[in-house]
Structure formats: structure tokens, C-alpha cells
Image: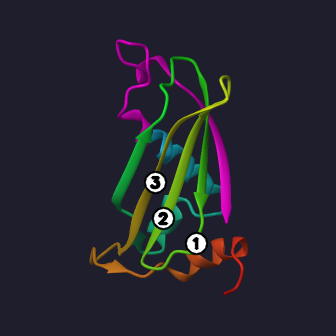
Amino acid sequence: MLIHKTTLRVRYADTDQMHYAYNGKYFEYFEVGRTEMMREEGLTYRTIEENGYQMPVHEAFLKFKNPAFYDELLEVETRVERLPLANVHIDHTIRSKERNIVIAEGYIELAFINKNTKKITRAPEFFIDALKKYFKEE
């Protein structure tokens, strides 16, 4: 299993009138977590696109547990629990570093498509190769 942690701070622009992080921002926080995880593995979106692929989101789920507040430090834990085939399932847990509580949990599923034809394809070998060190051979 691949586990990555990213820290970010709730910006004032992320909050609503109640000073809570606005609900629409949580998917952005997920994106920060998965982008940094993939970058660490040499899988930037630029690299993926230069190799002829794109990764649109085809499913997303988010469950709110507690509010996050302005200026709070959050830890976004990003996990890939199985090697991708036709899509990659990425789980996320957002925690308050200061209050040590779960703020939100959810997942994103991204498909792999051919950049030119926009048709769904299997996960490219270079993507699988970058991640397989985290998984036991089955």
C-alpha cells in the first residue's frame, strides 16, 4: 500500500461566513494530496500527459466528520491500496493536526484515457511500474 501525507493550511479564502472551510474546498484538498503523492513517485500530470494519457475523475465521494477552520493546519493522508488496472482508486483522510481529529474522508477514482482519442484505456505500464514497489506480488 502506498501512503503519503501532505500538510496544508486553511486559507481565509477557503472559508465561508461561519469561518469553516467551505465544503467545496475538500475536493481541492484531496487534489493537493494526490498531486503531491504522484509527484513524489515521478508521476506528475505533465509526465502522464507527455506520455499520451490523461486522468479524468469519474467518481468522487466525501464524508464530512468535523469542520476545519481558518488558519488550521490539516494533514491530507492519501492512500493507494491496490495497483490500478483501468482506473486508480485513491482514498483520502483529512485530519486536523492541532485538534487531532478526522475532518473528512473520501475517495477519488480516476480513469486513464488516451490523450488524443479520449477513449478509456488500461493503466499505462510506466504508471504501474512507479507504484508496484508498494504492493506484494499476487
In the depicted structure, whether residue 28 falls above or below residue 53: above
Q: In whole angstroms, how far apart are the C-alphas of marks 1 and 3?
A: 13 Å
Q: Secondary structure at mark 3?
A: strand
Q: How far across and down, in percent of the image, does residue 8 sit?
A: 60, 32
Q: Which residue is mark 2?
A: 89
Marking on residue 82: 1
Q: CA distance from mark 3 to mark 2?
A: 7 Å
Of the 4 image quadrants, the one containing the C terminus is bottom right
Label 1 crowd (10 A; few <14 / some 14-19 / many >=20):
some
**Marking on residue 37:** none
Q: Residue furthest bottom?
A: 138
Whether residue 32 is in magenta: the answer is: no
* Magenta run includes residue 19: yes
The stretch of residues the image draws in magenta is 1-27
Residue at the spot 64% in from the left edge and 78% down from the top edge: 129
**Residue type (three-letter) at the residue carrying disc 1:** Arg
**Quick one: label 3, few (<14), some, or many (20+) residues within 10 Å?**
many
Query: In the rendered structure, are the residues bearing label 1 and label 3 in contact, judged by CB atoms less than 8 Å apart?
Result: no
Vertical order, 134 against 44 (above or below)? below
Could you tell whether 125 is left or right of 99 in the image?
left
Q: Which residue is mark 3?
A: 107
